[in-house]
Structures are given as C-alpha cells and as structure tokens.
Amino acid sequence: MAGEIPDLVAEARTGTGKGAARSARREGKVPGIVYGGGEDPLPINIPYNRLFKKLKEGRFLSTLFNMKVEGQDDVRVICRNVQRDVVKDLPTHVDFMRLHRSTKINLFIPVEFVGEDEAPGLKKGGVLTVVRPEVELVVTAGDIPESITIDVSEMEVGDTATIAMVNLPKGAKPTIDRDFVIANMQAPSSLKSSGSDEEEGEEVAADEVPTAGDEAEASEE
C-alpha cells in the first residue's frame, strides 16, 4: 500500500479573475483552482516558495497530494496543469483535480529489487543495470502502491527483468501496452568484448523485449 501522501498547504482565495490573481502574485503567492469531485471549484493561493520547492522535487504532475486549506476538509488532489511565464518560465497558475478513492490516475511508482544476495549473476561478478527505476502505472487513488517489487534471486548473466515478472497490485496496470525491460544482468566488464560490427547491428533496444513474432520475421529474412 502507499506510504504517507505528502501534504500541500494552500489558502482559500477570496477573489477571482485577473485582478485577484495579480494581487496574489504581488504577495508572493501563486493562484490556482481546485475542481472536480462533484463539488464547486475552489480558488486557492499557494506560497510561491512552497510551490517552487515542490516543482523542483520533480514528478509534480504525477504526485498525489493531500491538500490542506483552512476551513475546508482535506482532499486528495493531483495537479493537472501548471501555467508558466513565457519569459521567466516561473509558475503563474496551477490547476488541481479532486480525486475520489475509485478515481483512476497515472502515477510513476518506484521499483524495488529483492534477492540480490542470492542472484547467481551477481555472484559471478555481473552487474544489475536498472533501465527503469520507476514504472508508470494506472492505479486507483484509494489503492496506490508505495512501490513494485522484482525478485532477482535467480537471475543469471544475460537475463532481463521485465514488467511481466511483476505481481502488480489489484487494479493496477502499466500505461505501456507491451512487455518491457526494467533491469538486466550484464556481464562483468572484464568479460565484455567490443564485438564485431555485425553483432552491434543486431543489438536490441534497452527497453524492448523481442516477441515470438519478431523472431519469426527475422528468421524469414
């Protein structure tokens, strides 16, 4: 299950329109709106420094927040748009959408690896190379996993770990509709050879998993 959802503190904005928005910016705040969830839109202001810090942390548009506004019930929200100044590239307005527990949303979920102490490939000097430290999943707002787990305890040198190996939480599914590589077990650098030009030409992209159909087409050629 998900860990603690980060708080995002805002304040209700009494006025609306361009005048109120300009006034908020002069006070060092970024105006915004909270909408959806079967309730009336709520105009808000967020202190600029607080919002800028959250933006710098990354994944702002795919992070679920617990919005706290004085005089209002806490509500789960996700940002759907950040308007920026065309010259300074600084935030000038933010839009948030309220979420019910059953709402489906796209979020990047961290990947955790277990079984590294037993992995035969690592014992032979191989290196576990992580291609995707996070995977974008469609999840329900009320059932967000803190992470997804891949067991690498049986991986040999040359093996790959793909999304098909992950036991996803109920109701969650990848946004990419194909099997894809999350990590691979590479040979020790001392055993790697530069390889011929022909071998290099046959390399598969790092996050592509050849299908049986692909192999059949290759054999026919």
Image: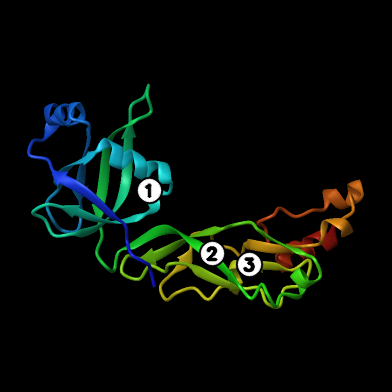
Tell which circle, 3 or 2, labels the residue nearer the N-terminal end.
2
- Residue shown at 79% from the left, 68% from the top: 157
Q: Which quadrant of the figure has residue 73?
A: bottom left
Q: Quadrant of residue 51?
A: top left
Tell me what residue is drawn at x 22 percent, y 49 percent. Answer: 9
Mark 1: amino acid: Leu
Q: Quadrant of the N terminus?
A: bottom left
Q: Badge 1: few (under 14), some or many (20 or more) residues near its Cα, within 10 Å?
A: some
SS class of the residue under badge 2?
strand
| Relative horizontal placement of residue 180, taking residue 96 as reference (left or right) | right
Marks 1 and 2: in contact by CB < 8 Å?
Answer: no
Instruction: Report which residue position mark 1 lands on.
Output: 61
Judging by the rendered image, the residue that carries numbered circle 2 is 111
N-terminal of the two: label 3 or label 1?
Answer: 1
**Which mark lies nearer to you, 3 or 2?**
2
Q: Secondary structure at mark 3?
A: strand
Establish if 13 lies above or below 151.
above
Near mark 2 (Cα within 10 A), the count class, few <14, some 14-19 or many ≥20, is some
Residue 207, position as x, y percentages in the image:
65, 56
The three-letter amino acid code for the residue at tag 3 is Thr
Distance from the alpha carbon under mark 3 to that under mark 2: 11 Å
Q: Is residue 39 left or right of residue 205?
A: left
Q: Could you tell me which secondary element the residue under label 1 belongs to? A: helix
Q: Mark 3 — residue?
A: 162
> What's the CA distance linking mark 2 and mark 1?
19 Å
Residue 195 image position (x, y, % from top left): 90, 51
